[in-house]
Amino acid sequence: MTSNATSLIELPTDLDCTHLPKHIAAIMDGNGRWAKRRGFPRMMGHKHGANALRELLRCCKDWGIGALTVYAFSTENWGRSIEEVDFLMTLFENLFQIELAEMVAEQVKLDVVGNLDNVPPSLRSAIDRAVTATQDNQGVRFTVAINYGGRQEIVRACQTIATQVQQGLIKSTDIDENTISKHLHTADLPDPDLLIRTSGEMRISNFLLWQLAYAEIYVTDTLWPDFDRRAFHLALLDYQQRHRRFGKA
Ligand code: IPE
Ligand code: IPE
Ligand code: MG
């Protein structure tokens, strides 16, 4: 049996397999509040959040969703306490190491987007190893945004394009939307069809500003560590009721 056939069997029967988002973006928010409600330190929320992410990635594979992009650390998150930032960097490093075998086995193709110049070198090495080991995989495209900011990404693209104009490689009048898209970290992915944000916040917090132009936005009060298969199922049901018009009547 092919993996595609397996995913059709496992897809909940009330979901239409011909109308699933091809690319889902997620702002994994609410780890701190999840921990606080239980009287735990914030770090415990991040640890449980990692479990929710593992489950979501597996669910994307099972249900035939081709690409998942998650916001793990924003350029603004450096403003948190040193303890929390250090904890998160170490957690990411451990996860890239521990989950690598599973990602290889599940054919996940990993990418990490964001400015990795100022993340700890040991995290950078773990990322390099995991990205290299999974680059030929044909399964879910899994993109993790670390030290990512949508505005910074657009600024960087503009700088590269301006240099090309200066060097006479392209004409300024040739710059179009496709030129910008091609210079973003996500150049080889379709734009997300669906953005999920947990914890009830109605904002996009500098995530994929260009790419989310026409994404359907789903906000749930569920806190990220509680975002399980059932919560994902509800998000997909909601998505399938949307009428995407793209500006047309
Ligand atoms: C999201 O959860 C995880 C990161 C930003 C790294 P938060 O840590 O923002 O959790 P809340 O919003 O404080 O509850
Ligand atoms: C967005 O969550 C960033 C990540 C989930 C990594 P934040 O908790 O940092 O966003 P704000 O501060 O609520 O906008
Ligand atoms: Mg938050």
Image: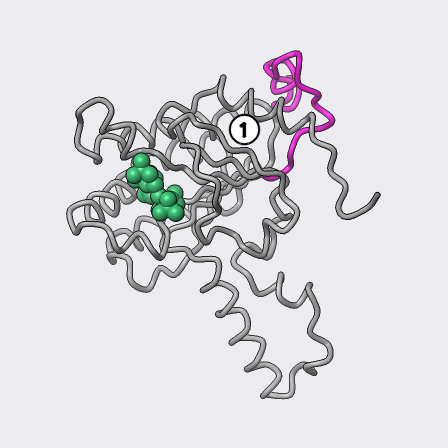
The spot of residue 8 in percent (x, y) is 65, 18
Q: Residue at x 68, y 81 (%)?
A: 172
Between 25 and 109, the residue placed more toward the observer is 25
Magenta region's main secondary structure?
loop
Residue range of the region highlighted in magenta in the rendering:
1-23
The spot of residue 229 in percent (x, y) is 48, 19
- Is the N terminus in the top left, top right, bottom left or bottom right quadrant? top right
How many numbered discs? 1
Q: Three-letter amino acid code at disc 1?
A: Cys
Q: Residue at x 64, y 40 (%)?
A: 193
**Can the viewer see residue 72?**
no
Instruction: Quadrant for residue 141, please give it.
Output: top right
Q: Residue at x 52, y 52 (%)?
A: 208
User: Quarter containing ligand 2?
Assistant: top left
- Position of 60 with respect to 44 (left or right) is right
- Is the C terminus in the top left, top right, bottom left or bottom right quadrant? top right
Which residue position is annotated with label 1?
A: 60
The spot of residue 203 in percent (x, y) is 47, 45
16 part of magenta stretch: yes
6 part of magenta stretch: yes
The spot of residue 6 in percent (x, y) is 61, 17
Tell me which colouring the rendered structure shows.
Answer: one colour
Q: Residue at x 64, y 37 (%)?
A: 22
Picture layout, residue 100 above or below residue 123: above
Picture layout, residue 118 above or below residue 88: below
Instruction: Quadrant for residue 93, please give it.
Output: top left
- Position of 111 with respect to 183 (left or right) is left
